[in-house]
Amino acid sequence: MTRLRDLLREGRLPTLEARMLLQEVLQVSRSWLVAHDDEPMSAELLEAYRALEARRLAGEPMAYILGRREFMGHDFFVSPAVLIPRPETELLVDKAVSLVAGRDGASVLDLGTGSGAIAVSIALACPQASVVATDYSFEALDVARRNAAALGAKVDFHPGSWYEALPEGKVFDLIVSNPPYIPVGDPHLTQGDLRFEPEMALSDGQDGLDAYRQIIAGARARLKPGGSLYVEHGMGQDAAVRELLENAGFREVHSLPDLAGILRVSGGHF
């Protein structure tokens, strides 16, 4: 008879991952699992655990197996249709919140929203703001809408490519985006979790800067006077993104470091 502790001791997976999969199969808390590790596993539950274990051993991200990932203190539903929210993106959300918090009627646009993690997090932190989000993928927008509904966030979603998704004449106080920025052919695309994530959300199919060119070039027509644009980018892309911003006429252009000291967000004001 297989007991819970036997599965945790097998060593096929790291203990933390095995615990998370057991919690998912049994629908119990971590504390319950610790207190009941001598419980036997039924054949049906053991089969369900082995199925999830096999997916993880094949390299599938835990977030896709569990169907969720924590971001900014909230659980977001995720699927292979969207990127998995990452801690470094919280820097972009924090910057956005600092710019619109307490401003009644402030309008925010999230371009390429994916799971909706950025837009929903801003809407939850700044309920007085008007938040709009776009994405080219209908499947991604379904995920984003599900997250907004589950978390009680008011976000207006539009399908389409960048600014083309928006009604004509719609302008904003703040535009944010975490667009695809990995250059085509980058070996990271064939490694780790990235192997399972949607390639169109990871790479622009060119030099990694094409999305920034489009977003920055179109920003002036979509920002109110004094409006701001902030984008997340890859490590080492900060100088190139700042140059694009400066050439487009943005003022006070600067980059922000993440907790590791890596410059990951750049932006400025009109």
Image (spheres, grey):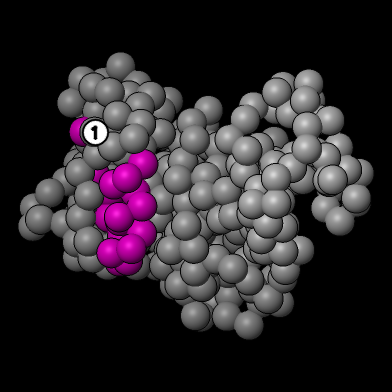
Tell me the residue at 55%/43% (across/down).
Answer: 69
Tell me the residue at 64%/52% (across/down).
Answer: 44
Q: In the picture provided, is 46 more to the left or to the right than 90?
A: right
The quadrant holding residue 221 is: bottom left
Q: Which region of the structure is painted magenta? A: 130-147
Quarter of the picture holding the N terminus: top right
Picture mark count: 1
Report if residue 144 lies within the magenta region: yes
- Of 133 and 163, nearer the camera is 133
Quarter of the picture holding the C terminus: top left
The vertical placement of 1 against 183, above or below, is above
Q: In the picture provided, is 140 more to the left or to the right than 254?
A: left
**In the rendering, at what x and y percent does residue 233 appear?**
55, 56
**In the rendering, at what x and y percent does residue 196 appear?**
59, 68
The vertical placement of 47 against 196, above or below, is above
Count residues near mark 1 (Cα–Cα under 10 Å), then give few for <14, some for 14-19, many for 20+: many
**In the rendering, at what x and y percent does residue 237 appear?**
60, 61
- Of 270 and 152, nearer the camera is 152
Q: Amino acid at mark 1?
A: Lys
The reply to whether residue 104 is visible in this rendering is yes
* Label 1 sits on residue: 154
